[in-house]
Amino acid sequence: MLLRALTPGDAGDVQAFVRGLSSRSRYERFFAPIAELSAKQLERITASAGFSIGAFDTAGRLVGLAEYARSSDGEAEFGIVIADDCQGQGLGAHLVGALLEHAKRSGISRLAGVTHARNRAMRLLARRLGFGVRPDEDPDLVRVERALAA
């Protein structure tokens, strides 16, 4: 696997990746039954002030995507999605690990995200990587958070 930061030139690969996800995976990541990303979502992932990283297999296919967006208080909100045929193989841990390292170097004090309460795989991954998991205001969601060392 090759992990690298995404750029605007990756927009076509990102869109193809999202289109190729199962409806369940798209819903778990984007919290809506989307078929593809809007132009605004695609721009946010490939050209925003945050950080987006992709995992590419040996054939050059995008198989994982992780990103964070910085908030005004020095914290960042993150999201991750892995191609259905690559889930459960440890790629999520590598991508979130890369996000954590980049966030630390960028002076972010806390990385946080939300996931569906029934998303057992994400809750387990978060705990394994040192995130706290707690209920969200929405009873269908849980919040994962990890303070980052200065």
Image: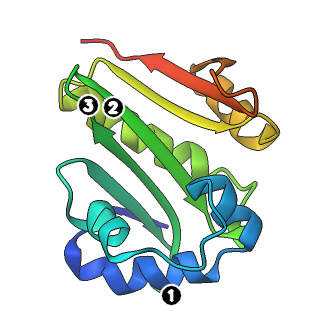
Amino acid, disc 3: Ser
Q: Are marks 2 and 3 in contact (CB under 8 Å)?
A: yes
The disc placed on residue 144 is none
Q: CA distance from mark 2 to mark 1?
A: 32 Å
The disc placed on residue 76 is 2
> Residue 118: x percent and y percent?
82, 39
Amino acid, disc 1: Ala
Establish if 63 lies above or below 149.
Answer: below
Residue drawn 59% across the image and 49% down it: 92
Is tag 3's residue or tag 1's residue first in the polypeptide sequence?
1
**On the picture, is 114 further left or further right than 148?**
right
Residue drawn 41% across the image and 83% down it: 13
Q: CA distance from mark 3 to mark 1?
A: 35 Å
Q: Is residue 57 visible?
A: no
The disc placed on residue 59 is 1
**On the picture, is 91 further left or further right than 55?**
right
Q: Name the quadrant containing residue 115.
A: top right
> Residue 137: x percent and y percent?
63, 21
Between 3 and 53, the one lying in front of the other is: 53
Residue found at the very far front of the displayed protein: 138
The disc placed on residue 71 is 3
> Residue 34: x percent and y percent?
60, 72
